[in-house]
Image: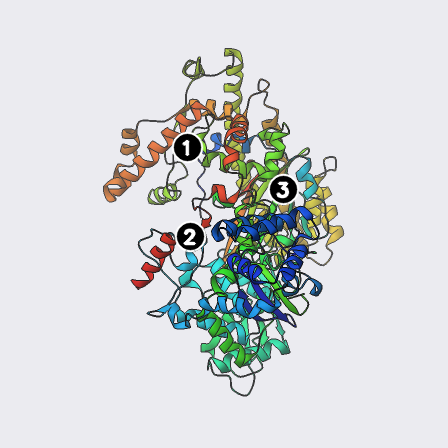
Amino acid sequence: MKKIIIFLTVLLSYSALAFDCINRDEQEELKPSPGRVVIKNFVHTLVYEKDSCGARGCDIRVYSQVHSKCMTNSFNGKGFYVENTLMPKQVTISKEGKLFTYFYSPLRGIFEL
Amino acid sequence: MYSHLAFSYPLFVTCKDNRLVDTDEISTEKTFEKLLKLSKKERELTIARWCQGSKECMGEFKQAVDLAKISYDLALKDFETKYQDLAKKLEDKFVDTKSTNALELLQLSTAVAEVKACQDTKQNLTPGDFVKNNKLLITYPYHNNYMYITGCKGVDTDTCYPMGTESVEKVIKEATIMGVDPYTVLSLSLMENEAQGVSSLYLDPIGVMASMGCQAKQVANGTEGVLNSYGTSYEVKAEVKSDPKLKAKLKKYFDEFKLGAELGNSYYCNNVQGGVPSVQEKAASGSCCIELGFKASKNASDSVARALVFPFIDQITKTPFKDKKDPSWRLQRYNGYTDLMGGAESVPAWRSGVNYYENPMYGEQAMDYMINGFMNNSWIKDKVNQYQKLYGIPESVICKGRENGTFVIDTNMYFQSQKETPRMSKIAQKIKAGGSFSSLNSREKKVLEEELRATADQNKFMHAEPKIDPGLENTISQKLGNITEIFPHGMLEEDEVLNKLKGKIKYSKDDLSRIYQGIKRATVLYSEGQKISQEFNTSYSEVGSLIQSNNVPELYQVINSLMSSDSESKTPEEIAKKVNAMVTSLDKETKEKLIKGIFKVINKKEEQMKLTEEFQKIKYPKGVSNLDFARITAAMTKYKTFEEYKTLYAEKIKADPSLEVELLKLYNYRQERINVAEMGTDLSEAAKEYFTNIYGKRSTVGQTSNYKWERLDEEQTNKLVKKYEQF
């Protein structure tokens, strides 16, 4: 599906443009711990708690580095993560029998359909 | 120990070898009657046990008994209050050792027969009394979001869609054959579907694949010999799984439903390259298969898929969740745990912000369905007994991990617990401790922002955004040939914007000018960034395909290290050196392609990073909030008139007149959004206002829901029952 990006939407979503760097709470989530799945690559880190996984999937979060000192929460979703080690720069999750692939927009710092 | 209210509407359950062998329900009133009928000595002993020696508590119960001599009704009311107060002080929801066996503790052993007799009043309704025109009457006692179990979403709903007896019986039979507690399956089915879909419990195909033991791994698009679905390619491991217990259950399932299980063997296979999973004579190569252990026809493929739901449920309820004893914690696994409901995907406001690790609401509601929807229904009980006689009694989630004996469950407990479940308590703590909206983490912000929007009409710092069909933009875009900007527009000059915002915003003229210039530059950078972003994506995909087709995934490490390092040289020579060191088997031409590709990827990434850093370096006056940015940028937007856009799309509108109406709707929406943005919304102020004046009325699930979260009264019950008469 083609995502339409309009000027106004972008400007009204200024917080996304200004990159809301994650705080200490969220940095903790990126550290491995028992029961937590952490998948890292050069710019993205995907995490989910195994406890969060049910018949409809897991609560999946991705954090992305937007520049050397800033990581942002770039994806929140529920579904089964289809393993792709975040390559080339996409997250695919399976929800209710369908696959959804979210592509990373480096300038906006988020994954979008 | 007993739970709060455990004495008020208890359900006695008898467990043996993890199996539920008997259930009986009594009410507070009946318990009180039993207490009155006991000899004085027995009564004193019972009260002493309830009160665990507390003289004050014993005195209060004695008072209630004495009061009964004057007014039974008053005494009963008094008794109920004391009963509940007492129970609230106690910890566990379940009686959990044989020494505190419910019957022993209540000292009602001599009266059990009478209790049962009272219970039999309900039981005396024959199973047939619960059925009308093949629809099942469910006497669910609450007015809440889950009352759809009755088939009616509300007391005053015009049309109801109750469960069909055939569907319910099928579920009971299926579950029992597959060795899974039918009450659990019915409850989870109702959590996932409305009443009519009780037999449609569904597992995600990837989940089914996992339950068969096969894993999926995504690979680059264009890779040959892999599954391509919805534009994404993934690799599924081809293997044959064989589980003797599962085979035996499937055989029984096929025999009992006469699905045709003949001597021989066959396989249920999912082709790793796609297609519909089906029963095969032989384990198909290149497929993920399970051995069935009998010969089945291809027509039975859907039946295997359905039967695989049951082992999944068995699996998730097998072990306790951490050290939790209550069954609701096991059932919660079907949905999964989250510490912030709504943090991942949006959920209705009444349950957003709930922490399932503290309140497993999903599991609690499944339990509530079980004990208040299904176990008290004679028709269902009759069917369960009927099939359990034939196929055996499966382990029950209620009895798993418990000693043999009779225990008590408070039938009001799960309802009450959900009703009182706190919402957004962690966020509230942070804000009340002086935190601002911006100090929250991103998931908390998401949940709170949705809550602020949901309560915008009560919050003086919020301006309600206009609502619009979310698909409208796509519909219009497609009709116009997939264009990216439906309403091309410009930007107002600085003077015009300054005049427009004069007196409406707190910034000085100079500061406003700096913000204007900053946004203008950011807009240009954004536009450039879009282009670079696309180029980066394309070059990365090309390299990804090369890496996949040549099976050299180790090269991702090269890309990885080059992208993450600031100081390292990233010249083609350096890249060539790294590639050559890692890959020796490839021919010269392929290596060169890879080096060129990686070089391009690195360059694009660097361009992106430079752009991002420049973006970050734009200087704005101190203290400009994101909301002020939004206000000012909205004020800068210069749309043309609708007539001009109409002229622009005249031909398309001529061909499809409905397009004009749709365009106008979207245009008005855009204009309205500008108005709202110009007014500004300070989420930090709005959050403070929310937690000061609104949160108190929405801090629990029961308070926030549109349903009353109360017991249905007689009139409401009669209304619901009357609806059944219309079937």
In front: label 1 or label 2:
2
Evaluate whether residue B542 shows in this view.
Answer: no
Q: CA distance from mark 2 to mark 3?
A: 46 Å
Helix, strand, or loop for circle 1?
Answer: loop
Viewer-nearest residue: B722 or B338: B722
The scheme the figure's colours follow is rainbow
Q: Position of residue A80 (x, y in %)?
A: 57, 55
Residue carrying label 1: B465
Q: Residue at x 50, y 77 (%)?
A: B387
Helix, strand, or loop for circle 3?
Answer: strand
In front: label 1 or label 3:
1
Residue carrying label 3: A63
Quadrant of the image occupied by residue A110: top right
Residue carrying label 2: B712
Mark 2 vs mark 3: tell me if same chain.
no
What chain does badge 2 belong to? B
Q: Position of residue B503 (x, y in %)?
A: 44, 12
Q: Quadrant of the C terminus of chain B?
A: bottom left
